Image (spheres, rainbow, N blue to C red):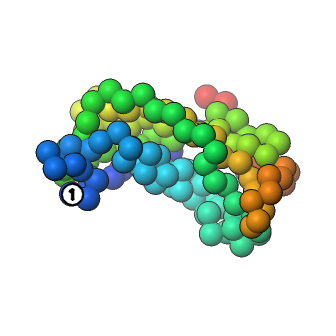
């Protein structure tokens, strides 16, 4: 399953030249990840209410070119894997014409409130299981 989220670039996402710099794409990954979980039927708030947390433990991105202020972007998010204590997400961000701006991955680890890594509950793994196709 790929979840597509549209986002209009605000001025605060850009540098003084009006371009989105690479680090802000990581924030767009966060937006995509939140909307992916919502589309699967569970929000971060609901996950945290169960005493589970999914902080990013690693992130990588391949910067192709910048977006600019007021561009309408599409963030495409999917899950690569969900097992044990970890969930791997994949992202592509494209412009209005479908041109690839950046792609990348994050790995999130399930922790308790104190930061101790723990296995994902079976129902969360089932919810996040990548779908065929």
The residue carrying pointer 1 sits among few (fewer than 14), some (14 to 19) or many (20 or more) residues within 10 Å by Cα, namely: some
The percent coordinates of residue 125 (x first, y second) are: 78, 47
Query: In terms of image quadrants, where is residue 41?
Result: bottom right
The quarter of the rendered structure image containing the C terminus is top right
Query: In terms of image quadrants, where is residue 88?
Result: top right
The percent coordinates of residue 90 (x first, y second) are: 55, 35
Q: Residue furthest left?
A: 17
The residue tagged 1 is 11
Task: Check the image and report above or below for 100 versus 20.
Answer: above
Q: Residue at x 70, y 60 (%)?
A: 53
Q: Residue at x 44, y 45 (%)?
A: 26
Query: In terms of image quadrants, where is residue 81?
Result: top right
The percent coordinates of residue 78 (x first, y second) are: 56, 39
The quarter of the rendered structure image containing the N terminus is top right
Count up the numbered dots.
1
Q: Residue at x 28, y 53 (%)?
A: 13
The percent coordinates of residue 100 (x first, y second) are: 33, 29
SS for callout 1:
helix
Q: Residue at x 46, y 54 (%)?
A: 31
For the residue pair 49 and 126, the one nearer the viewer reads as: 49
Asked whether, in this view, residue 112 is left or right of residue 29, the answer is: right
Q: Is residue 8 visible?
A: no
Task: Check the image and report above or below for 65 versus 45.
Answer: above
Q: Is residue 57 visible?
A: yes
Asked whether, in this view, residue 129 is left or right of residue 10, the answer is: right
């Amino acid at each position: 399953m790929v979840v597509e989220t549209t986002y209009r670039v605000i001025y605060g996402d850009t540098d003084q030249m009006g371009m989105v710099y690479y680090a802000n794409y990581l924030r767009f990954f966060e937006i995509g990840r939140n909307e992916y979980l919502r589309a699967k039927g569970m929000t971060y708030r609901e996950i945290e209410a169960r005493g589970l947390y999914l902080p990013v433990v690693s992130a990588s991105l391949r910067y192709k070119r910048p977006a600019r202020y007021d561009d309408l972007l599409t963030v495409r998010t999917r899950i690569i894997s969900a097992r044990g204590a970890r969930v791997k997400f994949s992202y592509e961000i494209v412009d209005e014409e479908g041109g690839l701006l950046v792609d990348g991955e994050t790995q999130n680890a399930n922790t308790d409130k104190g930061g101790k890594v723990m296995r994902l509950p079976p129902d969360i793994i089932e919810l996040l299981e990548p779908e065929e196709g």
